[in-house]
Amino acid sequence: MSLEPMVWALSGDAPVADVNEYAILGCMAETADRDGCGTWQSKETIAHRVKVSEETVKRCWRNLLRRGLIAKGDQSLVKHYRADRRPVVYDLLIPYEWFSNIERTNTERARLGREPLTPRNRPPIAAPEPRKERTDKGASRPKHKPADQGAPERGNSQTPRRGTSGPHHGGTTSRRRGNYESPTGELADPQTSTSNPTTEPAVPPVPPSLPEPDARELSRTDGRTDGGEAGQQMIRDTGTPVDRVKASTATAASAGVMLLLEIGAAHPELAVSGLALIDQGAALDRRLANGWAPDHLRTAVTANPKNEPIRNAAAVLAYRISTLPEAPGIPPGHGAAGATAPAVAVPRPRSVQQEIQNRAQHECQGRDGFCGRQVPVEGALCSACRKPCSAACGRGPAEPARLDGRCQACVQDDLDAALPRCVDGCGRPAIRSDGRCPACHQETTHRQAEAQQLKEASEALAALLGTASP
């Protein structure tokens, strides 16, 4: 945890719009790097810590992204998470002019492989728009007039109804106060008040739910095609479209419907009724008219493939009937009987070894073998590694997270060129406090340690020879 993002977020320098943005931005800054990058707390974690809802966190993220306080960062930082639980990486866009020691921050960014901060890539952030004030702010509220100036008197007033007579009274009465014994208590409920009848509308009784009309019941109409008054009432109560059931009564006893009824009697798991029976019966009627034999249709509909669970009889019948061609010898969806059916290309079966090679996943060997992305063929490169560097250096593929399309080697060269050179003249960038590169710094440290050890050995030998002489 670095203090710079926390100070920027909680000191009031960050232009937040409300207290929710202030708390959420402070919670994100707690896990960010020195430059404000690389924070990936989930919305559930932030909502639990800040004590707000997840919708509030998402709304604040949208507003902070729109106003430029945060931006999406390097998503490769969370590639070790599972794909369906991978959070979003955000960067806190702390302005360049806010950092007090920008050299130290850029040195830290160079160590992490990031480009240095400049006034161009970290500009100042504008203040949020001021909140709109209420139009009635400062206006005095109207006061109620007293009762003597014509205002109605407050309280439980009663409006007399038409046609009522007799004294108006409430629901309960109380005896006069006095010194007496009351065996039943102080309040009594003499009778129901006639001046305050109930005004709630009467709720009609809920009609009982009826099942969908069965085609076998609709067929028993004594020669009538409208289903009778009782059938029409049942249709209105169940919500079934009246026009569809009226049209279906004429075909309720068709060959397709009767075939489905026979199938349902022999196979109870495939029994259907109502509109499902009518629709699928019409589909069978079309196939019977195009030359299908009833026995063949029965066999095709009742054939249960191996390990096929039957969950919904209507859905299973609809699927099996839809896969049957309209006429024998014609594939489904290729015209009516007599039409020339196009040849269907049947894929050749693959061997076990071909199937294993097709399903095997291999890792991309780009980036000197550290890419690790999945590729279908061994030795192939992924799409990110196949894209060349925009600088045409020929040293490596372009970085997917960079907008300029440059490779990691070119980015490292730019970072090295921006750093000062080693004071020993080796040409390498100096990142140590003594102005040397790591190699020269280590070599100098070793030389100083050897000289110190030689000096201590010489002093010990001189002291030993001085004590040994007479």
Image: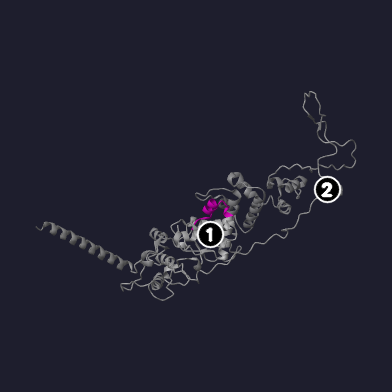
The span shown in magenta is 40-55
Residue furthest to the front = 470
Identify which residue is drawn at 60% across, 56% down.
Answer: 292
Residue furthest to the left = 470
Q: How is the image coloured?
A: one colour
> What amino acid is at disc 2?
Pro
Residue 88 showing in the rendered view: no
Left or right for 415, reference 468? right
Residue 45 part of the magenta-drawn span: yes
Question: In x, y percent, where is residue 216?
Answer: 68, 46
**Residue indicated by mark 1:** 11
- Whole-angstrom CA distance, mark 2 to mark 1, is 53 Å
Question: In x, y percent, where is residue 112?
Answer: 41, 64
Residue 428 showing in the rendered view: yes
Q: Quadrant of residue 366?
A: bottom left
**Residue indicated by mark 2:** 146
Closer to us: 312 or 297? 312
Left or right for 309, reference 254? left
Secondary structure category for the residue under label 1: loop
Q: In which quadrant will I find the C terminus?
A: bottom left
> What amino acid is at disc 1?
Ser
Work out whether 187 lies above or below 129: above
Q: In which quadrant will I find the N terminus?
A: bottom left
Work out whether 8 lies above or below 260: below
Q: Quadrant of residue 182?
A: top right
Residue furthest to the bottom = 392
Left or right for 332, reference 212? left
Secondary structure category for the residue under label 2: loop
In primary-sequence order, the first of circles 2 and 1 is 1
Question: In x, y percent, where is residue 188?
Answer: 80, 30
